[in-house]
Image (spheres, rainbow, N blue to C red):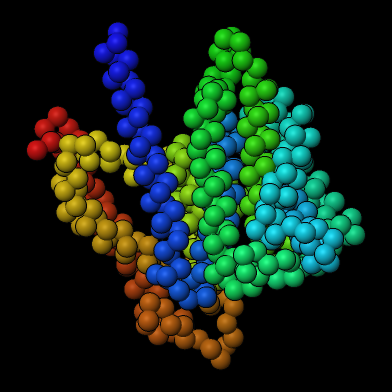
Amino acid sequence: MSTLTDLRRSMVAEARRRQRLTWLISAVVLVALPWIFSSSFSISIMTQIGIAIIFALSYNMLLGQGGMLSFGHAAYFGLGGFLAMHAMNYIADGAIPLPVPLLPLIGGVIGLFFGFIIGTFSTRRAGTVFAMISLGVAELIAALSLIFVGFFGGEEGVSSNRTKGPDFFGFNFGPDIQVYYVAAFWALIAAIAMFLFSRTPAGRMANAVRDNAERAEFIGYSQRNVRMISFCLSGFFAGLAGGMFAIAYEIVTEETLNMNQSGAVLLMAYIGGVGYFIGPIIGAIIMTLLRTVLSNFTELWMLYVGLLFIATVMFVPSGLTGLLMMHGPAWKRRSLKRLLAPYAAISIPSLAVIMGVGGLLELTHFAHTTSMDDRVMTLFSIPMNIDSLLPWAGLIALFIGGVLGVRRLRPMLLDAWADANGAGGGD
C-alpha cells in the first residue's frame, strides 16, 4: 500500500512541476511578445487576444466544465465593462483613488453580482431550458441598455480617458504597450485561477453534474448548487474581461453585451474545443486574428468564420484542440513522422478546395457590389475580369480538382493513420 501511495505522490508532484513550468513559460512568452511583434497594430491585436482569452475561458466554465449552454454570456462581460467605465470616470474626477490596472476587478465584482442574481433562478434547470433562459436574460439586458440612457449612454455608449487616473509606478497607461501588459497580467492570473478551480472538488463536481446530474444528486451533491458556483465564477471572470475591455478601448457601447458578442464567445469556445482547458485559448486567438487581420482583406470574413464553425461541428466536434489531441497516441509511439508525407500530399488539394470556394465567393460578392465601370478584381494577386468566363471556370475547376484530389488521397491518409496508431506503429 505504501508503495502505491508513494508512486501516486510522485506522479502528482511531477504533474505539479510540469504545470508550474508551463505557467512560467507562458509568463515569459507574454513578457517577450511585444519585443518580437513591436508594431502598434500587433500590440493592439495581442491586447485583444488577452481580453478574448479571459472571456472565452469564463464561458468554458459554463459549457465545457458545467455543461451549461448559454446564449447570453456577453451580458456579464458588458455589465462589467460599463461599471468599470463609470469607475474610470470617477477616477478621472479624483473621486476614487484607484489605480487603472485594478479596474478589471470592479468589472469582475459586478459580473459576480449579476451572476449571483441571475443564477438564483437560471441554474435551477439545465439543457434547453437553461439556454432559453440565458437567451431571454441577454435580450432583456440588451434592450435595457437602450432604455436607461443615463447609465448605458444609449447608442453612443459611455467613454472615458484611462490616462486621467493616478500614476501607477510612473505609468499613465497611455501607450498601447502598457495596456498590453495589463491585459497580459490579468489574462495570466485569470487563466491560472480558472485552471486551479477546475482541479478543486467544486470543479470536479461541475464535470460530474455535466456528465450525469442524477448520479451526482444520488451521492449527495446538489446539482443546482454546483451549477450556481460555476455560474457565479464564470460571471466574475466575464466581468473581469469586460473591465479590461473598458481600459483597452476607453469606450463601452451596447454592442459589448448584445447577441453578437455572445455568439462570438460561443464560436471561440467551440472552434477551439470546449472539452479542453486550452481549447478556448486557441479559439480566442483564432477568432481575434480573423476579426482583426482577415477583415482587412475581405468583407466576407464573417462568412468564413461561419463556414469554419460549421466545418468544426460537422467534422471535428471536439474542436481544433481535440484534433491535435488525436495525435497523442502517435506521438507516444514516436510514429508521427509517418503522417508527414500524407498530410503534405493532401494539403495541396485541400488548399485548392479552399481557394476555389473562397475565390468564387469573393467574385460573386464583387459582382454584386461593384459598378458597371469597375469589372476587374485582383484575387490571389491575379487581375480577374468578372465579365469573362475564364476566372469563373478556373475557380470551379480548381474546386472540383481539389475535391477529387482529396477523395483520391484520403485512403492513403487513413492507412497511414492506422499504421501510426496501430500495434506496429512504434519504432
Where the C terminus falls, by quadrant? top left
The answer to whether residue 271 of the structure is visible from this angle is no
* Residue 342 at x, y percent in the picture: 19, 51
Give the residue drawn at x 49%, y 30%: 199
Where the N terminus falls, by quadrant? top left
Total marks shown come to 0
Residue 356 versus residue 334 in the image, above or below: below
The answer to whether residue 332 of the structure is visible from this angle is yes
* Residue 213 at x, y percent in the picture: 58, 19
* Residue 146 at x, y percent in the picture: 85, 57
Give the residue drawn at x 24%, y 48%: 410
Give the residue drawn at x 27%, y 54%: 406
Quadrant for residue 253, please give it: bottom right
Quadrant for residue 18, please give it: top left
Quadrant for residue 378, please give it: bottom left
Observer-nearest residue: 369 or 150? 150
Give the residue drawn at x 57%, y 67%: 178
Residue 124 versus residue 288 in the image, above or below: above
Q: Is residue 199 left or right of residue 240?
A: left
Observer-nearest residue: 1 or 151? 1
Q: Residue furthest bottom?
A: 373
* Residue 138 at x, y percent in the picture: 75, 45
Q: Residue furthest left?
A: 427
Q: Residue furthest front?
A: 169
